[in-house]
Image (cartoon, rainbow, N blue to C red):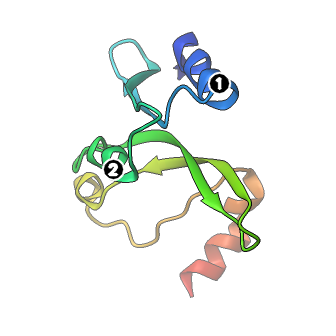
Amino acid sequence: MAVHDDCKLKFLELKTKRTHRFIVFKIEEKQKQVIVEKLGEPSNTYEDFTANLPADECRYAVYDYDFLTAENVPKSRIIFIAWSPDTSKRELDGIQIELQATDPTEMGLDVFKSRSN
């Protein structure tokens, strides 16, 4: 699955210029690539972001989260979200364990065994 160049460009804009509050990415089946589906304006809220995640389809997203530390210092973190609503999983009736992995060690047979007990 390829990632369209526009995805990288828009993410770079979010990261360096803060021109977007969030980006929602969609897998375009016909083109066999990940594309930008929605860009959030810097003034958009978290509610605006969640309103752009479909209730019955999977998406990838990044969200630029602003917050204050315990010392009242403003910070921000870019958060990656793999959106997978329950309604999209119902198509695969019979799944008993759900696992998310970012490298092979997080989905080794020992992990399968520990999650199966």
Residue 46 or 32: which is nearer the viewer? Answer: 46
The image shows residue 40 at horizontal and vertical percentages of: 40, 32
Q: Is residue 75 above or below residue 28?
A: below
Q: Is residue 17 left or right of residue 64?
A: right
Mark 1 / mark 2, whichever is N-terminal: 1
The image shows residue 18 at horizontal and vertical percentages of: 60, 30
Q: Quick one: SS at disc 1?
A: helix
Q: Is residue 79 above or below residue 37?
A: below
Residue at (29% x, 41% y) in the render: 52
Tag 1: residue type? Lys
Q: Quadrant of residue 69?
A: bottom right
Q: How many marks?
A: 2
The image shows residue 98 at horizontal and vertical percentages of: 47, 66
| Mark 1 touches mark 2? (CB < 8 Å) | no
Residue at (31% x, 56% y) in the render: 85
Q: Is residue 51 left or right of residue 31?
A: left
Quadrant into which the C terminus falls: bottom right
Q: Quick one: SS at disc 2?
A: helix
Residue at (49% x, 37% y) in the render: 21
Residue designated by label 2:
50
Rendered image: mark on residue 96: none
Name the residue at the bottom extreme.
Answer: 117
Residue at (32% x, 52% y) in the render: 47
Tag 2: residue type? Thr
The image shows residue 61 at horizontal and vertical percentages of: 48, 40
Compute the Cα span from label 1 to label 2: 22 Å
Between tags 1 and 2, which lies in front?
A: 1
Mark 1 Cα-neighbour bin, 10 Å: few <14, some 14–19, many ≥20: few
Residue 54 or 114: which is nearer the viewer? Answer: 54
Residue designated by label 1:
17
Mark 2 Cα-neighbour bin, 10 Å: few <14, some 14–19, many ≥20: few
